[in-house]
Image (cartoon, rainbow, N blue to C red):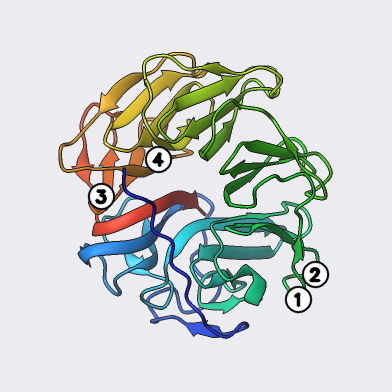
Amino acid sequence: MPAQLRTVLVLPALMWILLPGNLPSAPGADRNPEAMRIFAAVFSVQGSVSGSSAGRFGVFVRQAADTAWSMVTRSNVFTFGLGRFERGSTRRLYIAAGNGLHRSTDDGHSWRIVTSWETMEVLSVVPDPVDSATVYAATPWGVFKTIDDGLVWVHKEKGFKRWFVRMLIMDPGDRRVLYAAAEDDLYRSTDAGESWEPLKVGASQILTVLLGRRNPEFIAVGVEDGGIRLSEDGGRHWKTAEGIGNSTVYVIAGSPDGARLYAGGWQSGLWESDGTGRSWRRLWADPNVEAIFAVCVDPRDPNHLLVGTDGQGVYESTDRGRSWNRGGLMGGKVKQIEFYP
């Protein structure tokens, strides 16, 4: 399996990024809670991206009912992932990118890099859902945290044996609990990132992690050449999921009600399971799709699925995977897809 590409771009910190002017004319304009938008993080391209109105790779957005994508960043920003903070009247969007963490406070009209030289490459971002000044970032050099809106970033390394962290997620029921998918194990912090403990999954190269919606102690992780490992008791014991074999799994996602789980990875297609995740079946595969990096379920319609691929852009289904159509961004390596109001 080819090594994953990691690119570091050296740009001055606190650089302003101006947008191409394809968003609403005023921050927050036309923001209707019922009118969801779909955001896609495109890391790079094979050839050129089609189905978009501007740019080659970066972050793209479209209305949920539309098919045309528009870029909301400067073209050619190596984009690994997305994050969002929304509380009261405060709304912030984040981009985990090859040249740092980008933040927008005006609904995507302008962006600012808020990380320093120590956190040049950000692979995943988790904003605190209550305190807008607190943000966590996963990098090849470990986890960093800011509590002052990005002015100072502190390396939170206590407990890690190896630093490379691909993904961070926060427990939706407790903002002090975070999980880090690292190169040697899955780590958990119960003190807002100050210290970390390995959960002894029994596999290295943890690529993704999902927490259960129905069972708060359910944890699923995707590993390289090892399928999916599950814990139903908060990480005390682990077992291997059936059906998916030793596939490399890049993403695990769930429906809003937790009734269905989906997984995708390297040369194996899209997989489906019930909410327990114990047994999986292949839902869809296309010979043109080498890898699946992103799976997203419409929060308003569990039958509406979107899949982000390696070089084939987005595929979309409105009947829970029975049939699929091209969803745009052809040529793009789509790392994450999210529905945001």
Asked if residue 172 lies left or right of residue 273, the reply is: right
Residue at image location 72% in from the left, 51% down from the top: 129
Residue 177's quadrant in the figure? top right
Q: Mark 4 or mark 1, which has the lower sequence index?
A: 1
Residue where numbered disc 1 is placed = 151
Q: In the image, 136: left or right of 250?
A: right
The amino acid sitting under disc 3 is Gly
From the viewer's perspective, is the residue at label 3 or at label 2 nearer?
2
Q: Amino acid at mark 1?
A: Leu
Residue 115 shows in this picture: no
Q: Measured along the vertical axis of the image, is residue 294 above or below residue 90? A: above
- Of the residues shown, which amino acid type is indicated by label 2? Asp
Q: Label 2: which residue? A: 148
Frontmost residue, 269 versus 104: 269
Per the model, the C-alpha gap separating discs 4 and 1 is 33 Å
Q: Are marks 2 and 1 in contact (CB under 8 Å)?
A: yes
Residue 327 disc label: 3
- Where is residue 164 drawn, in percent x and y? 59, 52
| Residue 191 point in image, percent of width and height | 84, 44
Of marks 1 and 3, the one in the foreground: 1
Q: Is residue 224 visible?
A: yes
Number of dots carrying numbers: 4
> Which residue is denoted by mark 4 in the rendering?
295
Residue displayed at 40% across by 40% down = 295
